[in-house]
Amino acid sequence: MALVKKGSRLITVDGSTYRWRLRGRPTYVQALVMSPLAYAVEHAEAPGTTLVVTTDRPHPGNWLGTPGSPVPPAQVADSIRTALTTGWRPQSPGSPFHLDRSAGFRPSR
């Protein structure tokens, strides 16, 4: 399933172009700072398997006012490189590939 183009950003990593997107509104557990921010990445020209990256920060739109910081493009590029070396095949069909970078996240409860 392709990412929605509205609100997504393009990033070029090692000569390949990818599309990445953060969810605009937090999920219920993200809003309560019980789960960290996550974003999705796919190959821009030939989307196949989606990469889902779980970060170590709260969603900036959480309901508790916990400070959240934006995801810089350099971190997205680093996550793409890490996922590629650990088995993500962005142009092949398949289930989402999960990359967990949530070490250090502190839930609100």
Image (cartoon, rainbow, N blue to C red):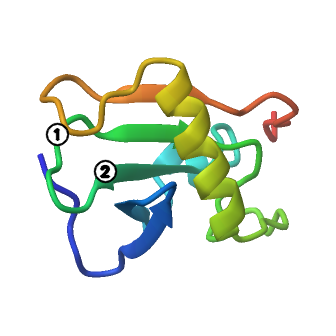
What residue appears at the point 20 percent right and 67 percent down from the top-left corner? 4
Q: In the image, is 14 to the left or to the right of 32?
A: left
What residue appears at the point 81 percent right and 41 percent down from the top-left corner? 108
Asked whether the viewer can see residue 68, the reply is yes
Q: Quadrant of residue 88?
A: top left
Task: Say if mark 2 contacts mark 1, CB within 8 Å.
Answer: yes
Residue 27: x percent and y percent? Answer: 46, 51
What residue appears at the point 51 percent right and 54 percent down from the top-left corner? 14
**Closer-to-camera residue (67/52):** 52
Image quadrant occupied by the C terminus: top right
Q: Residue furthest bottom?
A: 6
| Amino acid carrying mark 1 in the image | Gly
First of labels 2, 1 by sequence position: 2
Q: Residues within 10 Å of mark 1 (few under 14, many from 20)?
A: some
Residue 44: x percent and y percent? Answer: 25, 62
**Closer-to-camera residue (54/75):** 75
Q: Secondary structure at mark 2?
A: strand
CA gap, disc 2 to disc 1?
Answer: 7 Å
**Closer-to-camera residue (77/62):** 77
Q: Which residue in the protein does label 1 denote? A: 48
Residue 25: x percent and y percent? Answer: 45, 68
Q: Which residue in the protein does label 2 denote? A: 42
| Amino acid carrying mark 2 in the image | Glu
